[in-house]
Image: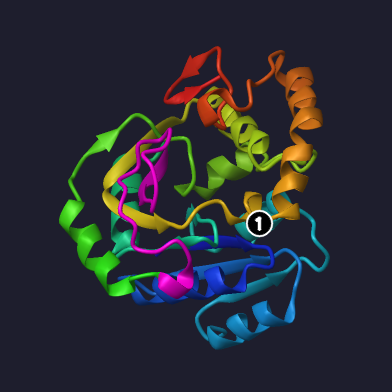
Amino acid sequence: MITIIIPTYRNPEYLDICLKSAIEQQSMKNEIIVAVDGFIEESQLVLDKYKNDIQILDLGENQGMQMALNLGVMNATNEIIFIVNDDNVFCKNYDLTISKEIKNYPKTVLTLNQIEPTGPGIFNFPVNNLGRNPKEFKYDEFIKYEQSINKDELTTDGGIFPFAMHKKYYMAAGGFDTMYQSPFICDWDFFLKLDLMGLGFVRTHNSHLYHFGSTATKNGNEGDKFKATEGPAAEMFKYKWGMIPNLYENNSHRPKGVRIKGIIF
């Protein structure tokens, strides 16, 4: 079994289909931890719907994705953890793919491929517009389509969400740095720490989650709030690592300058 950790912030419609698919498409009875970073009534209704199949961590007031993930991992009872955003839809037997690949490559950060409605983007995800929001999403069509494009292949372009790994390595790296107020730069910081620990980064093409898009950074004022923190976070990154990320090079949320195991800095 694995532990799935899903941070969520006031995103009930997406969380609903995320949890529905996580439960319906698993092949084992996995542990599903939802780290709720700011409750609203609509989210509570979704959580009540799946309460028999999930564990809920209430962070109270908004403390940020990094804290939500760190607390989720700390509460995980399985060694293999899978970190997923709440705007993802799970594919059939995703847990079998993760268990197999992490068993074969234990010192690895495993990214599961994604299908997106628009693109191709910087990560070259397969493109198929099966819905840009939960209301128009073609759930059954996605399950069939995803199975048709799967191939038993690993590539060395991981180091992005959603990802699976051993809990012990996450904890040894100290988790995500909660000092950053940027959802992008904290990712780079975390993956850089793992690289320096000697972990590899791969992407499997044998399972594809559906990704509606980064709802936290697109929804009006919330998106503006995230973008406004890029400057100070970048300065903190420079102070810590001695280099500053080029934030929006070709619409990429990756810094540039140094190439390491599938991550570009």
Badge 1 amino acid: Asn
- Image quadrant where one finds the C terminus: top right
Give the magenta-colored segment's residue range: 109-136
What x and y, as percent, mark residue 226?
A: 73, 44
Residue found at x 30% / y 43%: 204
Residue found at x 50% / y 81%: 53
Residue at the spot of label 1: 219
What x and y, as percent, mark residue 157?
A: 38, 31
Q: Identify whether 173 is placed above or below 37.
A: above
Residue found at x 18% / y 45%: 152
- Image quadrant where one finds the N terminus: bottom left
- Residue 131 showing in the rendered view: yes
What x and y, as percent, mark residue 126?
A: 30, 45
The secondary structure that most of the magenta stretch takes on is loop
Helix, strand or loop at label 1? It is: loop
Q: Is residue 112 magenta?
A: yes
**Number of dots carrying numbers:** 1
What x and y, as percent, mark residue 149?
A: 19, 52
Residue found at x 42% / y 26%: 262
